[in-house]
Image (tube, helix red, strand yellow):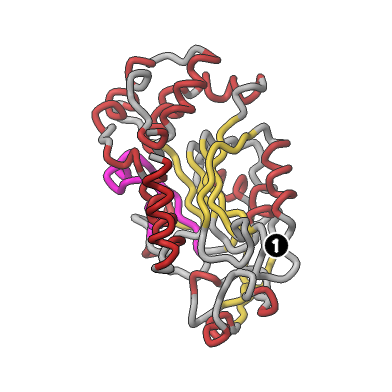
Amino acid sequence: MRFILSILFKIFHTLKINSRVINFLNNKRYNANDGYNFQNKIEKLLIDKKLIALDIGSQGGFNSDNFFSKDYNKYFKAVLVDPLQSSKRGENNENFINKGLWSSKTKKKLYILGKRPESSSLYEPDSRLLNIHDFKKKDYHLFDVTETKDIECDTISSSLNSFNIKELDYLKIDTQGSEFEIIKGLGDFRPLLIKCEVQIHSMYKNVPSWNQLLDLLYELNYMVIDWKTIGFHSTRSPVEADMIFIPDFKKESGKKLILNKQKEFISLMLISGQIKILQKISENINLEHSEYFMKIKDRYFF
C-alpha cells in the first residue's frame, strides 16, 4: 500500500493536483458516515419530542451549511437568527430572531458586504489579512463595506427566555468573528452539541483571538471532538475551522448534563456522525440505550 501511494503521490504532484486529491479524500472521509440512515433509531429515542436548536447566522434556513443530512431536519424545533433577513425566513414569527446576538443587550454597528453578504460582520473587514486567506487581489473588492447599519443586539439567554424556551440541545454559530461575545451570553443554557466557526487568523479587525473562544468553552466545561477546515489558506494550519464541542464527560457537570438528556445526546451524536466517540463516552459513563449505537462501525476510521 505504501509503495502504491508513493507512486500515486508522484503522479498527482506532477499533474499539480496533489492538494485537490487530498482535499477530496479528506472531505469524503469527513462525511463517511452520511451513508447511514439513523431515522428509525432516532424516532424510537425521541418518540414525539423535538430537539431544540438555535441557528445563529442562518442565511438559507436551518442547517443550510449541510452539517448533517436534511432528512434529520424534521427532528428539530429551530430558532433562526439573522439580522439581515426578514422574519418570513422562519417557519413562523415565534422561531425567528431578526436582530444580532452579543454578550449583553446593546446596539452594534453591522458592516454589510453587499457583494458577499454571508461575510457581513459586527467587525470591520481588514483587507491586509485577505492574502493569508489566499484571496486573489482581484477579489478583494468583495470585502468592501457597502453599507453600515445599527442593529439591536441581545443575549442568547434573554432571546430564548422571551420565547419561553428553557433548554437548548443544539447550538450553531457562524457570525464572522462575534462567536466569542455570543457565547458569553449563554447564561444558564448548556447545549448538548455546539458547532462553532473559529477564526484562527481572522480577516476582521479586533476579533478576539481564537484561544480566548476555546478557553471560554473549556471554562463552560465543553470539549472539542472534531473540526473541519474552512476555505483556502496560505498557512499550513487552517485560517478558519468549524469546531464541534460537547459537554466534557470527564467532568462531573458535563457528565451530569449528558446523563440527564441521554436520548437527546445520543440522537445528536448519531445525526452528526460522531459514532466512535459516542461509543467511548458510553463505556466511560454507562449510557443507556446502547443497543442503538454500540454495534455501528464508524466509517471515518476505516
Q: Position of residue 228 (x, y in %)?
A: 51, 50
Circle 1 crowding by C-alpha within 10 Å: few under 14, some 14–19, many from 20: few
Q: Which residue is mark 1?
A: 106
State which quarter of the image contains the C terminus.
Answer: top left
Q: Which portion, as a residue range, is magenta?
A: 61-82
Quarter of the rendering occupied by the N terminus = top left
Up-down: is 31 above or below 235? Answer: above
Residue 34 appears in the figure: yes
Q: Residue at x 46, y 28 (%)?
A: 265
- For this rendering, which residue is in front, 96 or 136? 136
Residue under the image location 47 percent in, 15 percent down: 287
Name the amino acid, label 1. Answer: Thr
Where does the image place residue 253, in percent across and percent down from the top left?
Answer: 65, 23
Residue 211: give x, y in percent of width and height.
73, 49
In the rendered image, the vertical position of residue 117 relative to residue 46, given as above or below: below
Q: Position of residue 143 (x, y in %)?
A: 57, 80
Q: Which residue sits at x=43%, y=52%?
A: 95
Nearest the camera: 49 or 278? 278
